[in-house]
Amino acid sequence: MPESHENPLLGLGYEIPFDRIRGEHVQPAVKELLAEAKARLDALPTATGPRTFENTITALEQVTEQLDFVMGVVGHLESVATTPELRAAYSAVQPEVSEFFSGIALSEPVWNALKAYAATDEAKALTGTRKRLLEKTIADFKRSGADLDPEGKKRLAEIDVELAQLTLRYGQNVLDSTNAFELVLRERNELAGLPEGAVLAAKASAEAKGLSGYRFTMQAPSYLPVMTYLDDRAIRERMYKAYATRATEASLDNRPLVQRILVLRREKARLLGFDSFADLVLEDRMAKSGHAARKFVQTLRDKAQTHFDRENAELQAYRNEIEGPDAPAIQPWDVAYYAEKLRRARYDFDEESLRPYFSAERALEGVFAIASALYGVRIEPSPETKAWHETVSTYRIVEPNGHASAVFYVDLWPRESKRDGAWMQGLVTGVWSPKIPASHLEVLAGNLTPPIGDRPALLNHREVETLFHEFGHLMHHASSCVEVRTLAGTNVAWDFVELPSQIMENWCWEKEALDLFARHHETNEPIPAPLLERMRAARTFRAANAMMRQLGFAEVDLALHVDWDPARDGDPTAYGREILSRHSPAPLPVDHAMLASFSHLFSSPVGYAAGYYSYKWAEVLDADAFSRFKREGLFSREVGAAFRSEILARGDSDDPMVLYRRFMGREPTLEALLERDGLIASGTAVAV
Ligand SMILES: [Zn+2]
């Protein structure tokens, strides 16, 4: 058969032919890989001779290896370069694949083989990563229903298939609803207050659609400047309300989906013997239970509450100061606008004044330079690696010994065929052995402010942090030296996975690090010292609001997955709105429906559900761990090597708290985070 007729998804290796993968390839490839996986699974319990690690645990690992890989590649393409055909094909295979995955633990012969192996002397003598893998596999099987009776297993499988379908549709509704919105303003004078960059972007966006005037969308680089700078209150209100009601229009209404997803998750948890979905999910995380996670959120809320109230009173007082004592109460669509004005007044600091110093290209070079300093690696272009779009660049990481440990793609700009947000995805997680070093493949994707015409892409500071954040995930994946695929790379507990990413954001605030890359795109000057000082001083500005916002999301997530009872609490959107209101600086509108577009919780069967607190949890870890770099050297090769070998390289090969203690020499404390946010004075001791 000529090559063009072959299915590029079959026999997929380290070099992925993205230019040849089409929607039509998905179903035949997945059908074949599913059949192979089923055959491997069926063969596992029938192995001749005694049960061994090889014929049981390794064999189980291999059952899904290729299927996982191909589904990862297809899912990735659906995220960055979707087409109606690809989306339809991906949706079509999803139920069967998820049914197969959840069926593994429900197979009686496989479960019996696993238990038989666990009872052998070989299993009892296991140590290290292999011991952990066996223990985790058994716990996973139990959480997946291995001990249920046939009726229970059948119901569980139905729940999982329905959850996979509902959550996929939820995500697609959010994307479609986000894309469906546009606001086109005809007159330049309607844009008063908006920075020049945002005006140009809105003009370019209109032109791209064959329209005259200025086009605004729900995508972050378009939406956020409007909320922060646009003087016209009515337009801000309109944009805010559209954003807060995304995916509630009749054909894309996610609210019934949310209710159904929550009901199914609750039923699933009870079926498996857990009090709540949070307990089911968190058993395997650092927090261990829904109760412990809520206690953590509560502790931080207690620390933040008085600062939060003070900040909100200050903002209203500021509005009264500039608009008179009868100025109206601040509404949600006013918060960012007046906060930015107050920030400028107080610190003489305008976020936008930094943008000329942050070209995306140099920011990327900067984070590469920091990785080189800390880990001794070289990061260089990999032009022979082919991507899915002409704006995607490719690189490789070369270790001091010359081994190329990873190849990665960087895809930074928004496109309509790409989902929103920023993320890192590992496409190939290499397996390490003493003789063969691992080789990894990953993607760094974002929706940052794109270049316009000849002007380079100029980022704001938050976007630079995002870039550093995702690069932190990338280094975590790319540094993996774990002998077992499912415990390698970023396959770690969700409340640990943000440590390697969030810690990188700290370097964006340090002068020595900024001096490596933050240069004016026209004059090549570094950020002037007074501007940098003001930026750093403004860092703790409204920090309690930033914290409360995250705690609100964490609390609504935990409340929905611990307390919410459909009979007692009814409509989850209203229930969630009430909780979010308590964490909001201004009362939320009655039709506010954030849960309809809260993709973290509802666009995959588990995702961040019952795990949103992890962001704050990881912030505690990242602030605390970064304190060692601050103490011993921002570019210390020694601390870098310790961080890489004790944390980044270790994946999930040991308990995360053990890994953390090996790096820090002790358990984490809240102190560094509260201090960084200006919520306590330096030197106050606080236990986690
Ligand atoms: Zn992250």
Image (cartoon, rainbow, N blue to C red):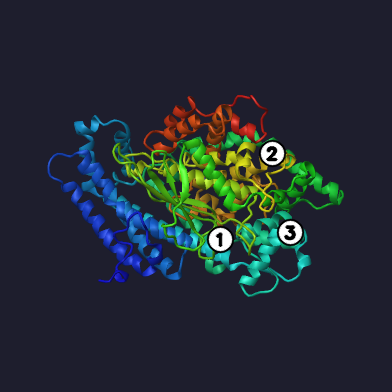
For image coordinates 65% across by 60% down, the residue present is 455
Which x, y percent locates residue 496? Answer: 47, 39
Q: Is there CB contact under 8 Å for labels 3 and 1? A: no
Q: Please, is residue 405 above or below residue 636 in the view? A: below
Q: Could you tell me which quadrant the N terminus lies in?
A: bottom left
Which secondary structure, mark 2? helix
Indicate which disc residue 414 carries: 1
For image coordinates 48% across by 48% down, the residue present is 609
Pointer 3: what residue?
194
- How dense is the environment of label 2, judged by Cα within 10 Å: few (below 14), some, or many (20 and up)? some
- Check disc 2 and give the amino acid type: Arg
- Check disc 1 and give the amino acid type: Pro
Q: In the rendered structure, which disc, 3 or 1, sits on the residue that comes first in sequence?
A: 3
- How dense is the environment of label 1, judged by Cα within 10 Å: few (below 14), some, or many (20 and up)? many
Which secondary structure, mark 3? loop
Q: In the rendered structure, which disc, 2 or 3, sits on the residue that comes first in sequence?
A: 3
265 left or right of 135 in image: right
For image coordinates 57% across by 41% down, the residue present is 505
Which x, y percent locates residue 99? Answer: 33, 57
- Check disc 3 and give the amino acid type: Leu
Single out the residue that lies furthest toward the left: 49
Q: State the CA–CA distance, disc 2 to disc 3.
A: 24 Å
Indicate which disc residue 175 carries: none
Q: State the CA–CA distance, disc 3 to disc 1.
A: 20 Å
Indicate which disc residue 536 carries: 2
Q: Please, is residue 257 above or below residue 625 in the view? A: below
Which secondary structure, mark 1? loop
- How dense is the environment of label 3, judged by Cα within 10 Å: few (below 14), some, or many (20 and up)? some
614 or 350, nearer to the observer: 350
For image coordinates 70% across by 51% down, the residue present is 352
